[in-house]
Amino acid sequence: MALCLLLARWCRAHGHRLVAMTVDHGLRADSAAEAGRVSGWLAARGIEHEILTWRGVKPVSGLQAAARSARFALLTDRAASLGARGLFLAHHVQDQAETMVMRLARGSGPDGLAGIRSRQMRDGIPVLRPLLPVPPGSLRAHCLAEGQVWVEDPSNRDRRFERVRVRQQGKGMTDAGLDAARLNRLAQAFGRLRDWSEIRLADFLIEFGDLDPRGFVTLSLSAVLNLPLPLRVKLLSGLLQSIGGLDYPPRAERMSRFLSWLDDGHGARTTLGGCLVWRGRDDRLWIARETPRETGPEMLCGQGMSRWDGRFDVSWSGVQPVWIHMLARKGERRLRLSGSMGKPGLALPVGVRASLPAVTDLDGRLFAPHLSDTWTSLRPLEAGLFHIEFRPAVPWVANAFRASRDDRAATND
């Protein structure tokens, strides 16, 4: 509520539209009523408000993580459909401190100890947390000064959740010298280290990598092996996460086995994090999406943008539905038999071609948008009806790779 009031004042002063969004997870009987109450409060202040509902079966275990992923998906999807220039979240300094304690307890590395990011890209939307340095007491005081009441979430007192247990031990941590302000300063120090490493890896990718917009990458293997181990782990785990369409990078023990495979030179290929990795000719390391045994199709019905395989934004504006799926070996054979496989497609390794997206229509025609002239009949796809863009939820190296050195130099100047 405090963030909403502050943003409303700023947006009115600068001529921007503000849309407040509440996610109703449907986990408590009174959650819908609470969201409706917020709508009433904001309507009285002339603030536009929407309620987004998490539907479907809720998991028994890992509930908070699943709810967080669902919440992000609902918020970023709606922000994208609104054409929003930013999604603002209200994390404060106590949230940062609790995150630091949990990550310290788990033995997180430097990136984990950088804590919550004040700015990041998520599903192509800039996510900003302007209140991250602010104590929650100051935010409550602002609401009181504005005559605004708020809702306290009962789940914030549920000791089944790790964050709640950490929060309730706050006095003991403060007595031990680990207050929120000190933990926040620690996060900022590790954050500067994280920023340095991402700039370094962005430069590395520009010089030694080829990031293909069709969703795969090639790297100089010798250059990768010459990176200091922490940077090598950060680079490869980030690439695997993005190309595999995952919410999180591979676990540490699996990364350790992968790095051993990379070092010893035994075995031409391996899999990790939903990716197929292999050593190619001329000192090249290839990373592409692994083709699962089951590659069931997903229907597109012309209802705006949707996410496919955790990697691509796709839209279809035709009258009849189509199905999107991985091309796989069977689809490639159909294209070859029809004579519609374009020459650009032949230059790609089979491991890449199999993972590319393909579309099938009601007539059974097959179309691979990243290959040329690939309809399995003479009638081409109607122009403008289908659009696809590789946009991983968590971009490679926090999106730093997108800018060239010249672009960053101009920005810094």
Image (cartoon, rainbow, N blue to C red):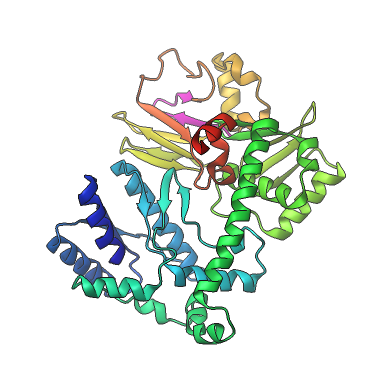
Number of dots carrying numbers:
0
Evaluate whether residue 400 shows in this view. Answer: yes
361 versus 50 height, above or below: above
Residue in the picture at 32% in, 48% down: 78
Q: Nearer the viewer, residue 23 or 368?
A: 23
Q: Nearer the viewer, residue 79 or 88?
A: 88
Q: What x and y, as percent, mark residue 190?
A: 61, 60
Residue 250 colored magenta?
no
Q: Quadrant of the N terminus?
A: bottom left
Quadrant housing residue 227: top right
36 versus 335 height, above or below: below
Q: What x and y, as percent, mark residue 176?
A: 59, 85
Residue in the picture at 68% in, 37% down: 204
> In screen coordinates, is 166 left or right of 51?
right
Q: What x and y, as percent, mark residue 100?
A: 56, 69
292 versus 57 height, above or below: above
Residue in the picture at 80% in, 30% down: 283
> In screen coordinates, is 201 left or right of 99?
right
Residue 356 colored magenta?
yes
Q: Nearer the viewer, residue 146 or 230?
A: 146
Q: Which residues are magenta?
A: 355-368
Evaluate whether residue 289 shows in this view. Answer: no
266 versus 33 height, above or below: above
> In screen coordinates, is 122 left or right of 77?
right
Residue in the picture at 36% in, 19% down: 383
Residue farthest left in this picture:
44
Q: What x and y, as percent, mark residue 219?
A: 71, 34
